Image: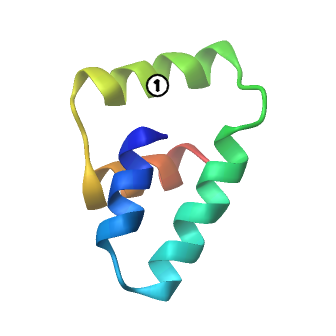
Amino acid sequence: MRELGIFFKRIEDEEVRKQINILEQAFRQPITTVLKRELNRLKRNSLTGEALLQELKRLN
């Protein structure tokens, strides 16, 4: 969530901002063990910015 917030502040494209808002809402809901494992993998791989956004959209 922290990385999405940082990316949100840097990006000016309103369409991307909408996507980030949708993802933030989705990932604030209770998550499964499998999803938790995937999110931990993204964190270990230090994904940020566009790469993080693409992976989160894939998971959602």
Q: Residue at x 34, y 59 (%)?
A: 7
Of 52 and 12, the residue lying toward us: 12
Q: Relative to 31, is 57 on the left or the right?
A: left
The residue under label 1 is which amino acid type? Glu
Q: Residue at x 49, y 86 (%)?
A: 14
Of 37 and 26, the residue lying toward us: 26
Give the residue pinned by disc 1. 38
Identify whether 37 is placed above or below 39. Answer: above
**How many numbered discs sit on the rendered protein?**
1
Q: Residue at x 32, y 26 (%)?
A: 43
The image shows residue 39 at horizontal and vertical percentages of 46, 27
Residue extending farthest to the left is 46
Identify whether 19 is placed above or below 15. Answer: above
Of 42 and 49, the residue lying toward us: 49
Q: Relative to 28, is 21 on the left or the right?
A: left
Of 41 and 8, the residue lying toward us: 8
The image shows residue 38 at horizontal and vertical percentages of 46, 25
Q: Residue at x 34, y 54 (%)?
A: 6
Question: For numbered disc 1, what is the local secondary structure?
Answer: helix
The image shows residue 56 at horizontal and vertical percentages of 48, 47
Residue extending farthest to the front is 9
Query: In which image quadrant can residue 36 be found?
Result: top right
Mark 1 Cα-neighbour bin, 10 Å: few <14, some 14–19, many ≥20: some
The colour scheme used to paint the residues is rainbow
